[in-house]
Amino acid sequence: MRMTWIAGGIVALALAGSVQAQSSVADLMKHEVNPAALAFWAAGNDAPEKETPRAATARWRAAADAVATLKAEGARMQAPPYAISPEWSRFAKLMAETAASAEPAIRARDTEAAFEAGGRLYESCNGCHKAYAPPRS
Ligand code: HEC
């Protein structure tokens, strides 16, 4: 009896794991990619008015974390079950590499360079969306 219960628990865990591994692309976008992109873009924007040094540090740190997220999500999207074509993977790779290319700028708190990278990041999002995202109404 006890054995059965344990086995049931393991099956439930395995199921939870596979459900997580297969979050929909929309979920990845909503919960990982888009929030990271917003933090990334915030590095290239003018600082909010009267930003305290502490808030500035938090903003740049969030941008650095965003780079890590975009690299990880870009890698994830280049692998099964997400990778659906070479073109798809190219866009996912471009997103990851564009984010990575901004690492020095973000470390140096270089707003102008971060802004420039933000434009390229947007192009990587948009390229994939034009090809693969259903038009929104
Ligand atoms: C490799 C392809 C690819 C890349 C790169 C990509 N996206 Fe997406 N994105 C999609 C697809 C496909 C959808 C549509 C998902 C659906 O509705 O099923 C989507 C949907 C979205 C959505 C809507 C999610 C929702 O349903 O609420 C947002 C927001 C989004 N993407 C943001 C971004 C941002 C920001 C970037 C760049 C930093 C980006 N995406 C890069 C493929 C991509």
Image (cartoon, rainbow, N blue to C red):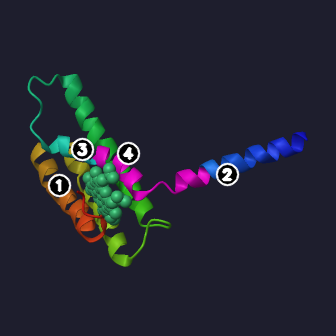
Q: Check residue 38 in the rendering and tell me which mark sits there, or answer none.
A: 3
**Percent x, y for residue 95?**
29, 61
Q: Check residue 31 in the rendering and tell me which mark sits there, or answer none.
A: 4
Q: Is residue 87 left or right of residue 117?
A: right
- Count neighbours of disc 2 (C-alpha within 10 A) and say few if under 14, some if 14 to 19, many if 20 or more: few
Q: Is residue 114 left or right of residue 15?
A: left
Q: Which residues are magenta?
A: 17-36
> Label 1 to label 4, Cα distance in Å?
22 Å
Q: Check residue 117 in the rendering and tell me which mark sits there, or answer none.
A: 1
The quadrant in which the N terminus is found is top right
The answer to which of marks 1 and 3 sits earlier in the sequence is 3
Mark 3, secondary structure of its residue: helix
Residue at horizontal 29 percent and vertical 36 percent from the top:
61
Q: Nearer the viewer, mark 2 or mark 3?
A: 2
The answer to which of marks 4 and 2 sits earlier in the sequence is 2
Q: Which residue is mark 2?
A: 14
**Percent x, y for residue 66?**
31, 45
Q: Is mark 3 within 8 Å of ligand 1?
A: yes
Q: Nearer the viewer, mark 2 or mark 1?
A: 2
**Percent x, y for residue 12?**
69, 47
Which kind of residue does numbered mark 4 sit on? His
Which kind of residue does numbered mark 3 sit on? Leu
Mark 2, secondary structure of its residue: helix
